Image (spheres, rainbow, N blue to C red):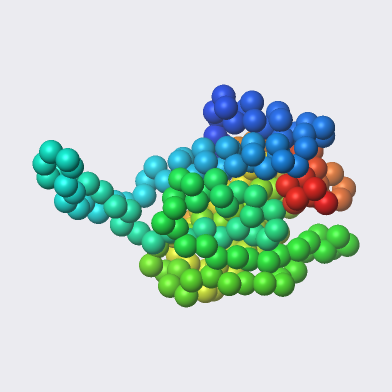
Amino acid sequence: MNQNNFILLEHPLIKRDMTILRDRQTAPEEFRMVLNRISRILAVEISKNFNVQEINVDTPLEKTKGYLLADQIVLAPVLRAGLGMLNGFLEVIPEAKVGHIGLKRDEETLNPIYYYYKAPVDLDKGITIVLDPMLATGGSAAEALNYLKENGAKNIALACLVAAPEGVKKVSACHSDVKIFCAALDRQLNSKGYILPGLGDAGDRIFGT
């Protein structure tokens, strides 16, 4: 991929865990556990450039310098599959606030349909991280990013598990200011808009539906 805003995490543990997630025999409980592990790695990677503010802290022996995150962090999982990534991110960034974006895909047109939105009103004050496991056509992710920007978000990142080149191209074209952090870049979409080789429907795999 030539898009400057696309960051593929080439990590041995992610490659191992992606193999487990792709396996159709992996049960929902193991799928959730492994997705949680990958989400923690994504959270660490995305947070590398977070700003910090210096504070004083008392150790058992003396005063020393310490640090807090300087910016508000908002995690915005795209319902419902994005919820599978939320706990992993919260384990790494427990002070983060959480918003929710409800989108579903029209299976005929492949276009996204809104059904829910709830997020902090002051998105402009910090960093918003959208959580969406599958970046397929890119339509839902692009619309979610549009909606967050309309509601004040200025500094946004997108974290996904698996992406298709078509989805990366769509989001990069519509939102060149948004960095995409991804665990795996797959080959293509099929005629129904599903990622190949992919791992199936992430929401169904997470929740056993």
Q: Quadrant of residue 111?
A: bottom right
Considering every residue shown, the one lying at the far left of the view is 62
Q: Is residue 121 above or below residue 106?
A: below
Q: Report the number of discs.
A: 0
Q: Residue at x 84, y 44 (%)?
A: 190
Q: Front-most of 125 and 2?
A: 125
Establish if 141 lies above or below 194: below
Residue farthest front in this picture: 60
Give the vertical position of 101 relative to 132 (above or below): below
Residue 209 appears in view: yes
Image quadrant occupied by the N terminus: top right
Give the residue displayed 55% in from the left and 45% down from the top.
88
Q: Give how far across and how far down residue 201 sits, in percent.
A: 79, 47
Residue, x 71% and y 71% (percent of image)?
Answer: 114
Q: Inspect this view and state whether residue 178 appears.
A: no
Q: Nearer the viewer, residue 132 or 33?
A: 33
Q: Nearer the viewer, residue 54 or 7?
A: 54
Is residue 192 placed above or below 22 in the rendered structure? below
Q: Is residue 21 left or right of residue 91?
A: right
In this picture, residue 63 sits left or right of residue 45: left
Residue at (57% x, 24% y) in the render: 12
Q: Position of residue 180 (x, y in %)?
A: 55, 47
| Residue 66, percent from left and from top | 22, 46
Residue 132 percent location from the top left of the image: 64, 52
